[in-house]
């Protein structure tokens, strides 16, 4: 079972008291992920960029059928997403060969916030939910805030140490591409 507790009033004190959670400097509660008999620590990482465009335009670029594959190309050529983007809906994040992640939309506020939980993989045309995967139930959250005609995009993503190097290289490239698309429309 996976446990993440972030500012949850009822369970946070319990997790802190039994030592499976800690209070971070930013006031958030953090707990490692326990899967079967192994423990894999997920860490939340943040990537930011400022874009000279409205939140509405950035939102459109993030989730548009034509623009999503463009800005996500640094992760995998031919990237695409299949979803209606509604809360509770399934999202398939796929590469050009049809492999990728099965996720769900856990929260959506148009032009402001979109949050996903990763649940499984897509391989050989099959969706496989894997509750013992170290990244099961990991979150990926997009927050847009606007000030003085620019939009700050903040992406918070839970990563295993094994994924950190790859994502740390790819996210800045993807954000650069997203910024370019949004500003040159």
Image (cartoon, rainbow, N blue to C red):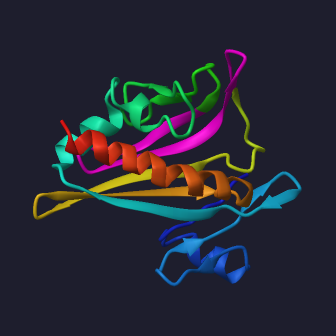
Q: Is residue 13 left or right of residue 63?
A: right
Q: What residue do we see at 49% from left, 34% from top?
A: 73
Can residue 110 be seen in this snapshot? no
Q: Nearer the viewer, residue 171 or 127?
A: 171
Q: Nearer the viewer, residue 142 or 2?
A: 142
Q: Is residue 119 left or right of residue 56?
A: right
Image vertical order of residue 20 relative to residue 66, above or below: below
Answer whether residue 119 is magenta in the image: yes
Question: Residue 67 is drawn in which quadrant?
Answer: top left
Question: Residue 154 is drawn in which quadrant?
Answer: bottom left
Secondary structure that dominates the magenta span: strand
Question: Residue 100 is drawn in which quadrant?
Answer: top right
Give the image location of residue 132, x and y in percent.
Answer: 78, 44
Residue at the right extreme, as displayed: 37
Q: What residue do we see at 67% from left, 15% from top?
A: 125
Q: What residue do we see at 65% from left, 25% from top?
A: 99
Q: Which quarter of the image is occupied by the C terminus?
A: top left
Give the image location of residue 17, x and y in percent.
Answer: 68, 83
Give the image location of residue 162, x and y in percent.
Answer: 74, 55
Q: Which residues are magenta?
A: 102-127
Q: Nearer the viewer, residue 94 or 86?
A: 94
Can residue 104 be seen in this snapshot? yes
Q: What residue do we see at 47% from left, 54% from top?
A: 172
Answer whether residue 144 is magenta in the image: no
């Amino acid at each position: 079972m996976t446990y993440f507790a972030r500012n949850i009033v009822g369970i946070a004190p319990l997790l802190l008291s039994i030592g499976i959670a800690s209070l971070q400097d930013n006031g958030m509660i953090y707990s490692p992920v326990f899967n079967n008999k192994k423990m894999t620590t997920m860490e939340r990482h943040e990537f930011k960029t400022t874009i000279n465009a409205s939140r509405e335009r950035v939102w459109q670029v993030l989730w548009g059928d034509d623009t999503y594959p463009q800005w996500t190309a640094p992760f995998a050529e031919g990237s695409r997403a299949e979803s209606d983007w509604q809360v509770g809906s399934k999202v398939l994040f796929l590469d050009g060969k049809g492999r990728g992640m099965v996720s769900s939309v856990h929260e959506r506020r148009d032009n402001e916030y979109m949050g996903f939980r990763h649940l499984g993989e897509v391989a050989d045309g099959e969706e496989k939910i894997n509750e013992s995967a170290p990244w099961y139930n990991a979150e990926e959250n997009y927050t847009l805030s606007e000030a003085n005609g620019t939009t700050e995009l903040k992406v918070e993503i839970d990563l295993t140490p094994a994924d950190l190097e790859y994502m740390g290289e790819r996210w800045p490239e993807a954000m650069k591409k997203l910024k370019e698309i949004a500003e040159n429309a």
